[in-house]
Image (cartoon, coloured by chain):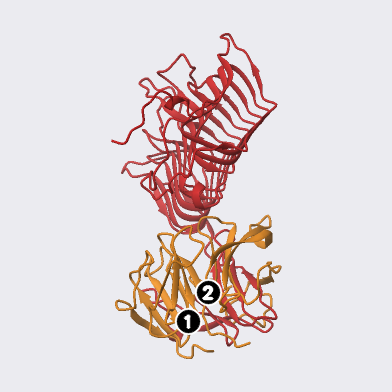
Chain colours: A red, B orange
Amino acid sequence: MLVAEPVSGTIAAYSLDTAGNPIPGTRRAFFSGPPFRAPQGVAFDRISGDLLVSTRLNSGSAIYRISGFNSGPGVGFSSLSQCMEITTPGHFTLTVNLTDTQGGGCVKIHDTYNVEIECNNLTIFGRPAISVANVNGFVIRNCRLEGPSGTGIAVSNSGRGEIVKNTIGSLAALHLSTVDFYAVRSTVLSDNTIFGAFQHHRSTGTSILPNRFTAPRPTSSPLLPGLILSDGSLNVQSMPFTLSIESNVLDGQSSPTNTTTGVQTGILLADGKKLNVSGNQIRNTILAAIMTSGNIVESNFSGNTIDTTEYAISGRSSNSWTNVRVAGNHVSNVLGLFVLTRTFGLRPANWDGQGASADKGVYFQGNSFSGNRLTPGPSPAEHATTLPIFDLLRGYQIKRL
Amino acid sequence: MRLRTGFGLAFLLVSMTSLWADTFGQGFSGYTVTVLPQPQVPVSFGALTMNPGSDDELILGAGSGGSSATFYRLVVQRDSSGHIIGFNGPPAIFATAPKLDSGAAFGPQGYFAYTIESGSGGVDIGSMAPGSLVTTRTANVVAETPGSLNFVPPHFPGAGQLKILTNSGKFYSLDHGLDGSWNHCGKCHVAGDLAGGQR
């Protein structure tokens, strides 16, 4: 544990006992001045691992950054030849195909930092094939990840990750959640081939670019709600939230007239701020290429190529849009270009059971639509645009029960 | 100005690996020091912590010890390796916190807690609910004047406990109060005495 000592101008290091308390006799001076004087607050930056220290002088308050904490010994290269837990930093290379025979997942990375998995295009079979929990810094590369059902990669409470050039899921098996993020920070999903859905819960700083998503075609198939599903409800209320989905190819393997297989939407976004959905090719979905629900704020849907669905961009359910830019989307073979409706009233506090704030209103303000192009398909479009925000409430008698 | 004796606490498994070789202690090498550009907030910096909701937001107490002391939200600027090199845009007020001292941390349920400088009406810890722009609760938690506090992060011994270090060097450990509802330290205990706290 590090302690800032203002009078001596020192950062001191202590060893901890088993209860997490400092052992007085273990004090050692870690860093001291001058010119460093009067240290006050100290905190670690999760991204870089650096220590930040504030100093308190009217004539010279400053913030110091001390780097080098993650440069110590312990990072090595290891072979990965069996399903196992990984709890230390290092580079692990898969040397054989792995199958989880015990259940509970095959490769379980947790409570560590800077772990790199190189699969050399070998296969890991498990449910999930790889899990990542409480890890700061991870790379999963060139893996083929499959399982009987469920998740190929499950990531939770982790950050600074890269999931690159993997094939996840298979065309013949249904994966409701092929890649699952929960409370994940600053992670990139790039150049992957994914058969199934990517679920993005309460995570931020995620970049998805460019990947190929394809709906699986199992013999008995319930519908998938979407290929990319994001829920950021807590974040949109009080915390910064960013999600960028760029230059991906999404194929839902269905159509508006085929309601038994494939996916209902390409990208389904529930409550989000600073969402960027641009340059994607989205085709063959049932209901919509891009569908939103809940509060969508300061977001950008532009330059997407959309083909064969009911509506290109649609807001449903508890839909509310503020400062959303929709520009330069090229759309063909759809019944409608934009359809934005609102079905439900204001959601009360904790509507999600996880502490979300109450809705303050239903908004459709500050939005811009420009340069979008609709090309008719074999069936004529019903309408280019419909914005009946409250239309579905028309004719209903609202009364208190 | 009188130098306060508050303490900052940070938990880490320190690796023994210097620039500024004369300022790092024996056994600590491989570290480098950078002074970041001055953020545009009042001087007399106090507590700081990273915002758990964003990897790019630093919460910094400024004007510490004063009646107008305030926590500011600073958006950090990073280099290609992820190191913080400065700040983007103007600071935004995170919350007002009169007499804030050198300790601040987010609790497991999102409550933000900070230490209050001595002689501030018998209270020593302030807290605010998630999203609040003002202090929502103050309490007298320990007998001495606390300098700093922190919550033990996951995967360390005592994970989740609130640790308080007083100006006299007493180190307190609390098993409760994670929701910001702590009372006077009837259930906590002195877990250590870092004698000579005013080093």
Residue A1 visible in the displayed image: no
Residue A68 visible in the displayed image: yes
> What's the amino acid at mark 2?
Pro
Q: Say which residue appears at 57% left-offset and 16% top-offset.
A: A383
Tell me the residue that label 1 is attached to.
B120
Tag on residue B139? Answer: none
Q: Earlier in the sequence, mark 2 or mark 1?
A: 2
Q: Quadrant of residue B165?
A: bottom left
Q: Are marks 2 and 1 in contact (CB under 8 Å)?
A: yes
The CA distance from mark 2 to mark 1 is 9 Å
Q: Provide the chain ID for the residue under circle 2.
A: B
B57 sits to left or right of B79: left
Q: Quadrant of residue A188?
A: top right
Q: Is residue A374 above or below residue B137?
A: above
A113 sits to left or right of B156: right
Number of numbered discs on residues: 2
Q: Is residue A346 above or below residue A24?
A: above
Q: Please tell me if label 2 and label 1 are on a single chain.
A: yes
Residue A223 x %, y %:
40, 24
Residue A15 x %, y %:
45, 78
Q: Say which residue appears at 38% left-offset and 36% top-offset.
A: A150
Q: Say which residue appears at 59% left-offset and 86% top-offset.
A: B3
User: Quick one: B105 or B119, which is closer to the camera?
Assistant: B119
Q: Which quadrant of the figure contains the C terminus of chain A? A: top left
How crowded pointer 1 is (Cα within 10 Å; few <14, some 14-19, many 20+) is rated as few
Tag on residue B98? Answer: 2
How crowded pointer 2 is (Cα within 10 Å; few <14, some 14-19, many 20+) is rated as many
